[in-house]
Image: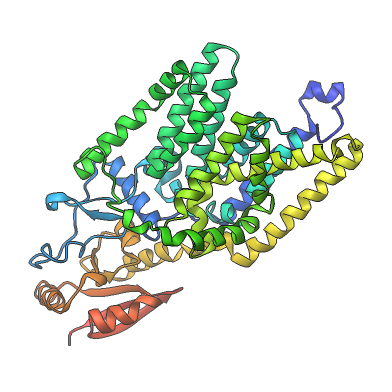
Amino acid sequence: MDFSPPPTPQAKLLGLNPALWLVIAALTAYAVLIAYHINACAGGSDSSGYMNHAKLLAEGRLHATERIIPGVNYRISHSYLYTPLGLKPASHFEGLVPTYPPGLALMLMAISPLSGWVHAGDAVILLHSLAGIVLIFILALTLGLSVRLSTLASVILATSPLYLNYSVQMMSDLPALVWVTLAVLTAWKSSHAESKTMQSGWAYLCGFAVSVAVLIRPTNALIFIPVLIALGLRPRRFFNFIVGGLPGALFFAYHSQAAYGHIGTTGYGDTWTLFESTYFTQTLYHYIHWLPILFTPLSLLSCGLILLLKKSTQLSLVLISWALVYLGFYSFYSCTHETWWYLRFILPAAPALIVGGLLSLRFLLTWVNLNNTSRSYLRIGYLSLGLLLVLPSAFWTKKLGALNAGRGESVYPKTAAWLTENIPSSSVILCMQESGALFYYTPFTLIRWDEIDLDLKNQIIAKTTAQKLPLYAALFNWEKDEALTQRFPGHWIKRTSIKEVTVWERKDD
């Protein structure tokens, strides 16, 4: 069902399809909105970790050099003293290695010659934000929804506070959604293509998409289950799928071996202690409360896919398994239930919830025989439904400050710029939350206040004094009391404030 009357022959000749131009205009407006709010810079642990990782890859290495104060004995019990957030000490004291997987860092490196390093993050996240909206439309259409319902799927995703929140900052959750969606879409196309050539081609692309998703975040291996269901477990398609994913898998193994000493190791280390069955009930209530807010009440309607199992078995199993592997896995994670934006971990499952909800809605409309209503009434009904879904999303986007996340990150590069311009290049900076960004933007020696005890403090004072190294601190408001009063007390003079960060200079006692 189209949105507008068929174009005139003259319009066809000129390529002026009104619906197409409406879509282009909407995507352009959305891109402008995101571009206005985006600030995908090196900020906290995650974002600075990706940016520092990308810089290392661009330089052809995976080990960064520690910036140390000569003579300070720190390696035995304070190995993280010079380690910024987003990096970790390498084995055998061979410098620093990235904490996070290489997928997003590879994209930043690849696009940096075109965008420059300053806007590499903006370009990667903006492109993924637009790609996610387009992909969910194609997915919905491919799975049998009408143009109107497929458009509604795109609108629900695009206006989700969670989607918008991660469309304006440097995080891996949005790219993970895009590549997971592409993986399921290509798997489905492979199993439903008419020619063997097309089946093979889509299977190759599916394997590649899965490998990129896993390079972005290893837990995206969860998508193997719905992908294999979508592929249909045919040996030929499965073989082509494996071949398509082989380059990514080999790079993952090479990267892990080079950085961490083993092909199956990641920078996260052992995270299983963060998963406990006691979190399940809390997270379940968290899902019930927030999913209708973040992805409209239609997301809960996806439970109706169970009723479609007999009629559309493969389709229902793909979407049900896609949603459940993410929601189920992260229901045991310690962070998921803490706040709304921690649902970023299940963002890759959003297309399954949205499309599944719309498929259930279509089933209900057919069941009550509303599809036989006149086209005019249906058009009004779809528009009314769209407004009923979008307006609450707009309300919650504003209430939660979802579009402000990127601008909030601006304090990191602004602090780095002030320090670069106003203190000596030989300075040593006491920091923690700012450490990853300062490592990326500045050449200063950085020391982590959370690693310091009395003995280490005395060593640092003695060595910086003897070597005439000025000592400063760059701290968020929530850090300064513990850092300057408990860990590193002394005569600190406040030099400036940059939003919620204060810069201090230490004078001799």
Q: Residue sitting at 48 percent across and 28 percent down?
A: 206
Specify the quadrant of the image occupied by residue 253.
top left
Q: Nearer the viewer, residue 193 or 32?
A: 193
Q: Residue at x 20, y 66 (%)?
A: 426
Judge whether 104 appears above or below 13 on screen.
Answer: below
The quarter of the rendered structure image containing the C terminus is bottom left
What percent of the width, then of the height, locates residue 356?
Answer: 64, 41
Residue 29 visible within the image: no
Compared to residue 280, the image places residue 239 above or below, namely above
Quadrant, the N terminus:
top right
Q: Is residue 376 left or right of residue 90?
A: right
Question: In the image shown, does 164 or 118 lie closer to the viewer?
Answer: 164
Where does residue 310 sit, x and y in percent of width and height? 66, 31
Residue 67: x and y, percent? 19, 59
Q: Residue at x 20, y 65 (%)?
A: 81
User: Is 25 situated left or right of 185 in this image?
Assistant: right
Residue 251 can be seen in this image: yes
Q: Is residue 241 left or right of residue 253?
A: right
| Viewer-nearest residue: 54 or 304 | 304
Snapshot colouring: rainbow
Out of 83 and 421, give the one closest to the viewer: 83
In the rendered structure, the answer to whether residue 277 lies left or right of residue 468 reads: right
Q: Measuring from the top left, give residue 146's x and y in whole percent.
A: 74, 33
Q: Residue furthest front?
A: 310
Image quadrant in which you'd find residue 286: bottom right
* Number of numbered discs on residues: 0
